[in-house]
Amino acid sequence: MANESNPIRSTAAPWQPLAFAVVLLIGVLIGKTQTGSHEGTYGQSTERGRVVHILDRIERLYVDEVERDALEAIAVEAILDELDPHSIFFSAEELAAMAEPMEGNFEGIGVEFIIQDDTLMVVAVIPGGPSEKAGMRAGDRILSVDSVEISGSDLTNKKVMEWLKGPRNTTVLVGLDRPEGSNEMLLRRDRIPIHSVVASIPLNDQVGYIKVVRFAQNTAQEFEEAMQELDRAGAQSVVVDLRGNGGGYLNAVVPMVESFLQDNQLVVYTEGTHASKRTYAAGRDGPWKDWPLAVLIDESSASASEIFAGAIQDNDRGLVVGRRSFGKGMVQEEFDVAGTGALRLTVARFYTPSGRAIQKPYGGEVEYEDDYLARYERGELFHQDSIRVVDSLMYRTPGGREVHGGGGIAPDFFVPLDTARWTAFLTDLSWTGILRDAAFGFVDAHRIELETFATPVAFPPSMQERAVDYLLTEAASAGWEARDLGDSEHDQIAHRFMAQVIRNVFGEEAYHAHLAAEDPAVQKALELLKHVSHLVVVDGRLTLPSNSTLTNENI
């Protein structure tokens, strides 16, 4: 809030807020590590001690009670707001919550759950976890924990996590309700893996598909195992899906890219004002250096995903398919702050092999958080010609492809956002959770029948019709008016709903296989890989010869 009685404020130079913020951060951090009392030091303020001096005075003399930690937190936040969008301070609690998916495991009983009708319901058991070993199964209701009933209107996800997660080798007694009766199950908590590679499936006899959702400590190993599995199954090329992947660890993505490159080819390099240039290159010939490769990206693919796509593109190693990526090209390092949390500070930028920086603009008048909306409004998500590139930041790959820096990775082959497949009604069903909850309800009501089928392909057409009828009934009971669906809308709702049903019955890989069968980007990548030997660079763009019946626009 502005202080109108302060004459200095109206005459302050534009740089003073940032300068004061920097002084404040330094003062706070140094002040927290100083020992002894500050009594008698008020007349000895230095540039770095000024803020400690002010906070000490406030704490000792201010008219009302203040929380010094809260004031320091406000100061730190204000400082970091003056830097880049990715420098941030995390509390100890926030750090702990973020650590699990990136470390690749957590400790608990190993179930996925939802709360439905005030009851904790098991959606899936994690393979190899304590619950699976003890015989728990999807569809079980957990009614009690350590003999205390837990069902009711005050049941929350947070409470469930507090009850069921815990240190390895500790035990918890859960009471289950099943159609055949109730029983109790003693579970010994263990380390539960969190997988980064959620699907590794053949798309046809020659092409495999791998879906990677993050770059964590275990991602490179999971990716190599997935590639080996596809190799053994007879695949000779691969589609790597990084859509929606917000990134992660640099040391996870480098060996993944390396597996597709020749020895000594550059993967990425980093450099900053106070960080000398550091290069990351392939240290071997990758085992899949000769495989045709397509990488799928979209506007939510960021950071390590962009390193992967940029390295493949800049080395002329494969095809990039989809829409322009997010544009996050900053390198952060994490520093502990006096036991209260950690400062994740941007220390460098990363650059693709051609020398382009991927970070999109920020600061000034740029609405960084509204970039997706800006892309939508100017038509970039629907038309390739609407992608904004900076001509002054144009580079060329060894093969002659034009690539641009300063705003993410632009694909070689564009796939528009398909709003026709996501009608307003389907979007509402998805965002409100009705689609997810109804899928679980349908599976729960027909589990015995559904589990008689070996694969989702064996489902009879009548099963899908019954499933959609169930969904529409549940939607109507939740307040969504019954409506007649056109053929196209009916088919899309059925496809999405059956994907959730399949996920609950057959697991994650079956779910992604079902979606891939009608995914425009996956199908475009398949068609491109079929004709990859005919692709050439014309006017800086990777394309097919003009005499081909297959072009960049109609693939």
Image (cartoon, rainbow, N blue to C red):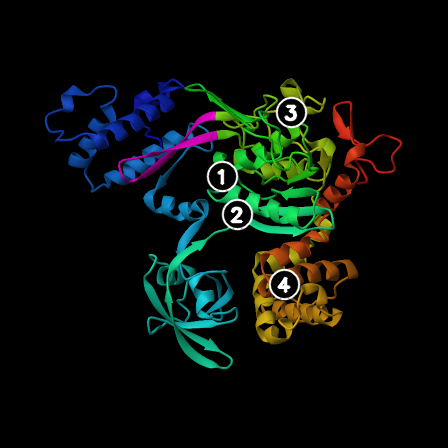
Residue in the foreground of this view, choosing between 380 and 104 = 104
Of labels 3 and 4, the one closer to you: 4
Spatial CA span between label 3 and label 4: 41 Å
- Provide the residue span drawn in magenta: 331-348
Q: Please name the residue shown 74% across and 23% down the image.
A: 540
Amino acid type at mark 1: Gly
Which residue matches tag 4? Answer: 502
Count residues near mark 3 (Cα–Cα under 10 Å), then give few for <14, some for 14-19, many for 20+.
many
Q: Of helix, strand and loop, which one carries label 1?
A: loop
Image spot of residue 467 (x, y percent):
67, 69
Disc nearer the start of the sequence (1/3): 1
Q: Is residue 424 visible?
A: no
Which residue matches tag 2? Answer: 196
- Quadrant for residue 504, please give it: bottom right
Which residue matches tag 1? Answer: 248
Task: Single out the residue that lies furthest toward the right.
Answer: 547
